[in-house]
Image (cartoon, rainbow, N blue to C red):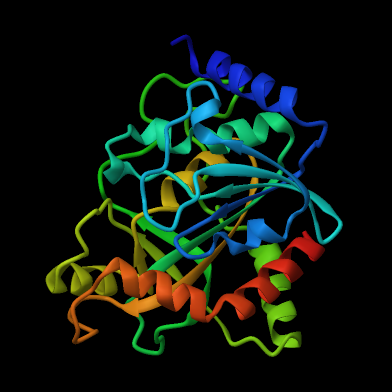
Amino acid sequence: MGNLSDRMNEAKAFIESKTDYKPTLGLILGSGLGVIADRIEAPVKIKYGEIPHFPVSTVEGHEGQFVIGKLMGKTVIAMQGRFHYYEGYSIQDITFPVRVMKSLGVEHIILTNAAGGLNPDFSGGTLMLITDQINIMGISPLIGENESDLGPRFPDASNIYDKTFNYKVIEEARSLDIDLKEGVYFYFTGPAYETPAEVRLARLLGGDAVGMSTAPEAIVAAHMSMKVTGISCITNMAAGIQKTALNHKEVVETANRVQSTFIKLVNRIIEIA
């Protein structure tokens, strides 16, 4: 397989053989949120299965492709669908696309997800700007040999979600009359939804939203000195808070319902990035 840098370079070379675009902004689009990629102008689409060393997305609502082109005047590369640890891939595999984005020239990445609400002030359809994250699952994409040309052995994690840029996002949301909440994202591996007891633990530890993605990607982005912005779409309240059973269909339906607001917010983030 070769080392990580070699695999990155092979994936990069393949993507560059398919397009002349030089993206500087990356997007990872979660369940029901891939519609943003459909708005990219003059798109080049590359299926994950074609790219060397890439896994393949298996989750309903995830298209499983890169879309590269112009959006709001910026050259972007969007992941229309992501990979998750629960799909059986290694934690390094699911974050590999972030490293490839960096190798292509991406300096700022916008991570989006569908999440369960922990904060009682939230409800289905709430949009939350991620201010920090909690990962106590005992897994990290940085475990193993560190390649110093990619990032430091012990990266600083005090400002993963860039605070200065987050302030700008809050101001822009206010100007758009979008009720954007702020909060901490709590990572569980899934694929089972959390138990009511786990939800109480996550809330007790300071979580505002809970989900099965994003945190590993953010860690790798920070390792490679990328600016990170995260947006959660609260598609349901978590177990024990929501009285009805949780299901993925509801996640996708709620994400679809708030699509227009989500698109408006992400477009503005891209404009000011």
Please identify the quarter of the rendering in which residue 223 is found.
top right
Is any atom of residue 142 visible in this view?
A: no
The quarter in which the C terminus is drawn is bottom right
Vertical arrangement, residue 232 with respect to residue 260, above or below: above
**Picture mark count:** 0
x 52%, y 34%: residue: 48
Q: Is residue 241 left or right of residue 209?
A: left
Q: Nearer the viewer, residue 127 or 251?
A: 251
Residue nearest the observer in this picture, 181 or 85: 85
Residue depicted at 19% across the width and 75% down the height: 200
The image quadrant where one finds the N terminus is top left
Residues 185 and 211: in front is 211
Asked if residue 239 is positioned above or below residue 198 in the image, the reply reads below
Q: Quadrant of residue 253?
A: bottom left
The quarter of the picture where residue 152 lies is top right
Q: Residue at x 40, y 53 (%)?
A: 213
Observer able to see residue 84? yes
Residue 256, compared with residue 82, is above or below; it is: below
User: Residue 9: horizontal and vertical position, in percent?
Assistant: 63, 18
Question: Position of 42 compared to 108: left or right?
Answer: right
Residue 162 vertical position relative to residue 21 in the rendered view, above or below = below
Q: Residue furthest toward the top?
A: 2
Residue 228 pos. (x, y %): 61, 53
Tell me residue 15's x, y (percent): 67, 27
Q: Residue at x 56, y 20 (%)?
A: 148
Residue 87 in the figure: left or right of residue 81: left
